[in-house]
Image (spheres, helix red, strand yellow):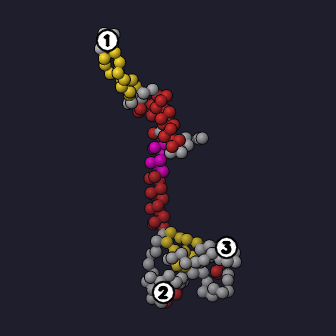
């Protein structure tokens, strides 16, 4: 596969099949104004362009629209998942209702007749909130509005 930059017109004239590349790079903008590039601004399916030594302009990268839309959709899905995880780790009426009574500690004890038994103590909401805060801190999540 050629890595030489080529205009679309030149590609068509040369009989090079025009395919829908996933991404292309446009030569730095100043190439249009530079007399040393008589063919004008070119593009390539590979990032072959150097940063312009005169003005520091870099090639412009374009991503095919369907791939961009797909990436945005994946981002939306990931953002929704993050939102659900944040909600699950924030103390609220909903999370209190979901977690209270779900966790307990079993301790050996002796009843009034001297019989040993195992007592079950619910983990208090305060402790559950401390655990949620530790998880948020580990994940570096910031509660909304903070
Ligand atoms: Zn330049």
Residue 119 in the image: state x and y as whole percent. Answer: 35, 21
Identify the residue shown where x is 50% and y is 77%: 45
Q: Earlier in the sequence, mark 3 or mark 2?
A: 2
Identify residue for label 1.
114
Q: Are marks 3 and 2 in contact (CB under 8 Å)?
A: no
The image position of residue 29, as x and y in percent, is 63, 76
> Between 9 and 33, which is closer to the camera in this rendering?
33
**Tag on residue 88?**
none
- Secondary structure, magenta segment, majority class: helix
User: Who's the residue at 53% across and 41% down the image?
Assistant: 137
What distance separates the C-alpha of mark 3 from that of mark 2?
Answer: 31 Å
Q: Are marks 1 and 3 in contact (CB under 8 Å)?
A: no
Task: Tell me residue 53's x, y (percent).
Answer: 67, 77
Q: Which residues are magenta?
A: 79-86
Residue designated by label 3 = 56
On residue 12, the disc is: 2
Please, is residue 81 above or below residue 113 in the view? below
| Residue for point 31% across, 17% down | 116
What secondary structure is marked by label 3?
A: loop
Question: Which of the pair 135/34 is nearer the observer?
Answer: 135
Location of residue 101 by image quarter: top left
Upstream in sequence: badge 2 or badge 1: 2
Between disc 1 and disc 3, whose residue precedes? Answer: 3
């Amino acid at each position: 596969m050629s890595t030489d930059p080529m205009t679309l017109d030149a590609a068509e004239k040369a009989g090079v099949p025009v395919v829908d590349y996933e991404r292309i790079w446009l030569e730095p903008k100043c190439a249009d104004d530079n007399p040393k590039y008589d063919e004008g601004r070119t593009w390539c399916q590979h990032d072959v362009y150097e940063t312009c030594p005169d003005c520091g302009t870099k090639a412009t990268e374009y991503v095919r629209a369907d791939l961009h839309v797909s990436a945005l959709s994946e981002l939306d899905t990931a953002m929704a998942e993050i939102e659900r995880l944040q909600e699950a780790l924030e103390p609220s009426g909903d999370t209190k209702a979901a977690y209270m009574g779900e966790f307990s500690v079993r301790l050996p004890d002796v009843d009034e007749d001297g019989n040993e038994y195992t007592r079950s103590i619910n983990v208090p909401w305060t402790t559950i909130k401390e655990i949620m805060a530790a998880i948020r801190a580990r994940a570096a999540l910031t509660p909304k509005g903070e």
